[in-house]
Image (cartoon, helix red, strand yellow):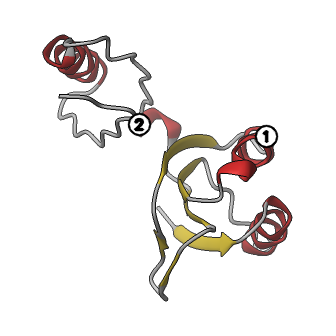
Amino acid sequence: MKAKSIKGKTAEEIKSALKQSMFDGFKPTLALVFLSAMNEIEAICSLLDNKGIAIFGATTFAEFTEQDAENKGIAILLLDINPAYFKIVLKDNEEGAGYETGCHIGETGKMTFANPAFIISSANYKI
């Protein structure tokens, strides 16, 4: 598996960085997207989706790469991991149903993989 990180302030900058990252034949299958540039979400999703790249993302206060940390931008870790080795599960966490949501995701992982591991992101979580 190879990994490359790209960053930018706009979808156009990300498009250019993505093209440059793929110039050597690198074909990412998964993008871990962190952004605080909220107005760019749809354009970034469309760009990655059109390239057949699965998206796991979160909005953040700041974005970081191996070089530095910035805010009001977009940072993406691109991976060329075999799609059979990961699964993205989206589940609405209804009020007070955090335990049930966790169980659902855990069961999905156990049914899909022999030794599952999880990366979890939440939005608007209220205790």
Q: Quadrant of the C terminus?
A: top left
Q: Quadrant of residue 87?
A: top left
**Tag 2: amino acid:** Phe
Q: Which residue is mark 2?
A: 86
Percent from the top left, x then y, of residue 126? 25, 29
Q: Residues within 10 Å of mark 2 (few under 14, many from 20)?
A: some
Percent from the top left, x then y, of residue 81? 49, 51
74 up-or-down from 40: above or below:
below
Percent from the top left, x then y, of residue 15? 82, 62
Q: Secondary structure at mark 1?
A: helix
**Tag 1: amino acid:** Ser
Q: Secondary structure at mark 2?
A: loop
9 up-or-down from 30: above or below:
below
Q: How many marks?
A: 2
Q: Is residue 13 left or right of residue 54?
A: right
Percent from the top left, x then y, of residue 101? 24, 16
Q: Given the current orientation, which residue lies at the most extreme bottom position?
A: 67
Residue placed at 19% from the left, 19% from the top? 98
Foreground mark, 1 or 2, reads: 1
Q: Residues within 10 Å of mark 1 (few under 14, many from 20)?
A: few
Say the numbered circle drawn on residue 37: none
Say the numbered circle drawn on residue 46: 1
Of callouts 1 and 2, the N-terminal one: 1
The CA distance from mark 1 to mark 2 is 21 Å
Residue placed at 51% from the left, 68% from the top? 3
Residue placed at 45% from the left, 63% from the top? 61
